[in-house]
């Protein structure tokens, strides 16, 4: 199967899962995660009718692909860990930054956004299962963190993101997504300053169906669109 066909296949499955939770395909943004994949392959994914977004986790690769694909209309998502000193390279280029987990990072994004006279939309990354190897805030830290956003008028918190634990046990994964949805709904109700809860980004190649059933409206799919990644290139 071609990359475009893989992507179309994913959209079919997304449609089914969305309908199970009383929604439609249009309610879900499917990000094709093109990290490690070359720009021409990345371009094939957005040929699928229904894919408008690409996701990258490294700043250098991100800015190169934006340049290579500047003739296309693409929403660019930064989904990986972001270092403060790299913020200057990406300001104004992202639809969403998914991986916010420190105030110093928010401060830098706010400062650079102000300079460029724009507002940057971000998601807070949550380490719901409290795994040592993962980035993100613990569950209890999320609300106090977002309450501090009132200081940062050039950053808007649009929701939450998580990477579920790798597990064979479906119920474990589902638990994480359910907890995320509850946390999302609770914070949304509070209508905090510089916060406009709209997006719940969760679900990857192995678990996106469960994520959608539990309320995700952004999923991030790499392997099932582009095939296994080769990190050596
Ligand atoms: C790589 C990556 C993905 C995509 O993972 P697949 O399992 O290949 O679908 C999604 N989210 C994040 C944060 C990633 O780093």
Image (cartoon, rainbow, N blue to C red):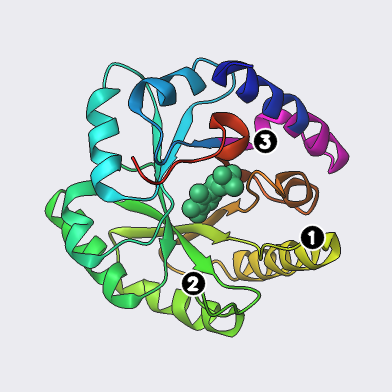
- Estimate the x, y position of residue 108 in percent, counting from the top left: 21, 66
Q: Are marks 2 and 1 in contact (CB under 8 Å)?
A: no
Q: For mark 3, what is the residue?
A: 27
User: What's the residue at 84%, 39% (across, down)?
Assistant: 22
Q: For mark 2, what is the residue?
A: 136
Image position of 12 with respect to 201: above or below: above
Closer to us: 114 or 95: 95
Q: Secondary structure at mark 3?
A: helix
Q: Residues within 10 Å of mark 2 (few under 14, many from 20)?
A: many
Task: Find the magenta span and give its range.
Answer: 14-30
Quick check: is the Cβ at mark 2 less than 8 Å away from ligand 1? no
Residue 29 shown in magenta: yes
Q: Secondary structure at mark 1?
A: loop
Quick check: is the Cβ at mark 1 less than 8 Å away from ligand 1? no
Q: CA distance from mark 2 to mark 1?
A: 22 Å
Q: CA distance from mark 3 to mark 1?
A: 28 Å
Residue 1 shown in magenta: no
Ranked by sequence position, the earlier of labels 2 and 3 is 3
Q: For mark 1, what is the residue?
A: 168
For marks 2 and 1, give the one nearer the viewer. 1
- Estimate the x, y position of residue 163 in percent, counting from the top left: 59, 60
User: What's the residue at 45%, 79% (across, down)?
Assistant: 145
- Estimate the x, y position of residue 102 in percent, counting from the top left: 36, 75
Quick check: is the Cβ at mark 3 less than 8 Å away from ligand 1? no
Ranked by sequence position, the earlier of labels 3 and 1 is 3
For marks 2 and 3, give the one nearer the viewer. 2
Q: Is residue 213 left or right of residue 180?
A: right
């Amino acid at each position: 199967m071609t990359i475009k066909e893989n992507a179309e296949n994913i959209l079919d499955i997304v449609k089914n899962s969305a309908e199970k939770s009383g929604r439609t395909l249009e309610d879900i943004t499917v990000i094709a995660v093109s990290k490690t994949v070359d720009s021409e392959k990345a371009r094939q994914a957005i040929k699928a009718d229904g894919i408008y977004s690409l996701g990258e986790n490294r700043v250098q690769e991100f800015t190169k692909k934006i340049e290579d694909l500047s003739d296309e209309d693409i929403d660019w998502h930064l989904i990986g860990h972001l270092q403060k000193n790299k913020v200057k390279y990406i300001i104004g280029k992202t639809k969403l930054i998914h991986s916010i987990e420190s105030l110093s990072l928010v401060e830098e994004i706010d400062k650079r956004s102000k300079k460029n006279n724009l507002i940057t939309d971000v998601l807070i990354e949550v380490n719901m299962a409290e795994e040592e190897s993962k980035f993100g805030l613990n569950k209890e830290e999320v609300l106090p963190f977002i309450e501090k956003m009132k200081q940062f008028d050039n950053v808007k918190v649009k929701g939450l993101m998580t990477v579920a634990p790798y597990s064979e046990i479906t119920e474990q994964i589902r638990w994480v997504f359910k907890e995320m949805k509850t946390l999302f709904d609770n914070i949304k109700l509070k209508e905090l300053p510089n916060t406009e809860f709209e997006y719940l980004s969760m679900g990857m190649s192995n678990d996106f169906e469960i994520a959608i059933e539990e309320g995700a409206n952004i999923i991030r799919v790499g392997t099932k669109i582009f095939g296994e990644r080769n990190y050596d290139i």
